Image: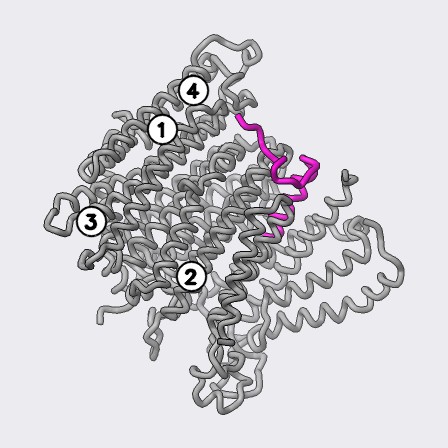
Amino acid sequence: MSQMSKIVRTQSNIIFPFIMIFGLYVIAHGHLTPGGGFQGGAVVASGCIMLLVAYSSAWVLEKIKVSRLSVFESLGALGFIGVAFFGLIFGGWFFNNFLVRNGILFNVVPETGSTLSNFNTAGVLPLMNFAVGVKVIAGLFVIVLVMGYASSLKEWKQ
Amino acid sequence: MIYNIPFIAVVAMIFIGLFAVLFKRNLVKIVIGISIIESGVNLFLITLGYREGGVAPIFTSAPSEVVKNAPGSMVLPVPQALTLTSIVIGVAVLALMLSLIMHIYEHYGTLDVRKIRGPEE
Amino acid sequence: MNWFELITLHSPPLIVAVPLLAAFLTPLVSKINDTVRNLFVLIMLSITGLLVLILGYDVLTNGIRVYVFGGGAPLPSGMNIPVRIMFEIDSMTIFMVIITIILALISILYSWSFMKDKDGLDKYYTIILLLVTSIFGMELTGDLFNFFVFLEISCITSCALIAFYVNKKESLDAAFKYIVISSIGALFILFAIGLLYAQYNALNMATIANAIQFTFFDKIVLVLLITGLAMKSGLAPMHMWLPDAYSRSPASVTFILVGATLAGLYGSLRVIFTIYGNQLLNTGFTFYPGLIIGIIVTALGVLSIFIGVFMALKRSDFKKMIAYTAVAEIGYMFLAIGSYLIGLALSVPDNPQMLIAGTYALKGGLFHILNDALDIGLLFLVAGAVYYATKQTSLNSLGGLARNMKYTTIFFLIGLLAVSGMPPMNGFASKLLIYQSTYQISPILSIIAIICSIMLLAVFVKVFQSIFLGPEIPSLKNVKEVPKSMLAAMALVACIIIFIGLFPNIIIDNLVTPAAEALQNTTTYISTIVGGT
């Protein structure tokens, strides 16, 4: 596949930051509004794939190596399982929510009923959302990048 | 009666998907059939949780008369979590099947299921 | 609490979490060196084996135990439905977990030198660790949707491993067949779990078992669950993926795939005995639903035995014969389970002899799970060793290998005797239990089982003669014996087979009888979570 025309490339350059900001918003507010790790990660990954379609996959592969994206993916997965093990070490049970009442960061318990949403709540969940979001972005992007690269290698017989 | 229409749609989607998997010859159509079955099962899981007159189960932004009798007038949130997990698994399975189809096309040169056979010995 | 009790308390999630952590760390570790990565995987699995032994000793002496994720009591204050995800470990679980860790350790030991000169090995070790995690998760959990998630993880990872030889076109075809059948089976299971949740508002196995009544929807759920799980474990007529997938993947991968298949069998045991236990095993009904399920399961088991044995007779590919034998052995296990259900139903108008026969059939079936995993696994390891030395798998082009590969010949002889149920091996003990008990329920079943077992002996003696004995073929003149780690793995399996064959009472009294009692006794399982009110 070859690069698309200059109009398409310029438009995707303009739109990509907005998509990324919206996707990161969906990841970060997963404990308050609908969304979370996988949903926001899929939005950001679709923005990256839009860039991949506009510039060809060969061009993108010169800039980004697949092995570095794999390190990114491993770090996201290790973050998730590491937070679960911290629940075992600090809270006494596996996957325990050890930050919710007496932790450092997200330790406010909201009162029941209709209140204003407070970002500082819900303990360990925003950390797990971030880890899963990073892993999903890297994972989905690598899948489509490798598929695009593989399909441009050989001439397809008809 | 009108609340039964999603269930009828679920059964229709599962049967259409099974028909595509069993009777179609192109590999990509078989994969599309599996995707339709999976959409049908996800629709079934979400429709289970509907309660009449319920609002979305976001506790901190619910209107106040809903909060007074909260468990009775919100839609069930647990099937939504089950559906989300199922969609994630479906994405992974679909990516795997499409990569296998790309490899198969490169080796065999055709996507017809009847012509793809290993050595029968 | 001292250290030992702390580890025993937290070992159920650690058995699942330690291989998962190792799987996520392997891509980073493998950037250092190859040997470091192999040692790292082996050490992590050994730690898991230690945890399995500690947990097994505790459960077999103290009884059932429950682990609640996120801490606290199973019933949080003010609620009367268990809402948290729980692992519930009884003796049947410990039996399957011990089988799985033996299979995983021997497979990693074997693939140390079987896979040495191939590339893409860091992904191979990552995916094998994820497959081991998913099998442990399927066996330890007490929550239905958790079981479904681990089932899907095992489908995806084992499909990726079957297609490991991407340069050969047959492996891709086998992997595609496997993923289509497995994902449709898993979607049926998800549909059934949705129906159960809609009726009883709970996903926990013990809560559903407490509250179940045999309505019309429950019958649909039972059929869908047994069909989906039988698709995963290779029961005829859903066995089409099994010969291709077992024979076209690397031998160390097939060794763990046997474990994944047996985890599907464990799932169907949980559905029949625990979730539907109060309905199917209750003999106070006027019509016996257990009798109908027993007849269907027995019929499918006999069909699997026939298809497995007769299709294995006319093949000329070494690995495909062993794969069809695996189909037949799954048929033996389902035959034993069906005989128990029939024996239970027929024993009601005061005929307790049938119940005793049925209990022996259940013990024979459970013992056969252990024996079959080891026997079929040993045969596949030998086939892998022959492929490693000669790069061929067809019987027409192999011959006279016993001159150069002495140890491999001995191991194949041991595996051959074990699969067909000959006396000094472990296959004899479990098959004798199955023959004795099914004879009292119906003599025809027992006759079919004995005849098919003898035909398996005929098939494998022919294979043995044509590969290892006979004149030497000139193109195979200088094959060498396989490397030491593969020989060590095969020797370990052979030693376990001979040990179980000579002293079967140790295994039956300590492992199989508590597992059979845990399956028959559903009230212990339910009352640990729901409470004895």
- Residue C25 in the image, given as x and y percentages of width and height: 55, 50
Asked which secondary structure carries label 3, the reply is helix
Mark sitting earlier along the chain (1/2) = 2
Disc 1 residue type (three-letter): Ala
Disc 2 residue type (three-letter): Ile
Q: Which residue is pictured at 50% across the width and 66% down the height?
A: B44
Residue C230 visible, this orientation: yes
Q: Chain of mark 2?
A: C
Q: Nearer the viewer, residue C424 or C147?
A: C147
- Residue A23 in the image, given as x and y percentages of width and height: 67, 69
Q: Would you say C155 lies left or right of C517 here?
A: right
Asked if marks 3 and 1 touch (Cβ < 8 Å), the reply is no
Mark sitting earlier along the chain (3/1) = 3
Label ID, residue C463: 4
State the extent of the magenta-drawn residues as a range.
Answer: B94-121
Vertical position of residue C249 compared to residue C9: above or below: above
Mark sitting earlier along the chain (4/2) = 2
Mark 4 vs mark 2: tell me if same chain: yes
Mark sitting earlier along the chain (1/4) = 4
Label ID, residue C344: 3
Give the main secondary structure of the magenta stretch.
helix
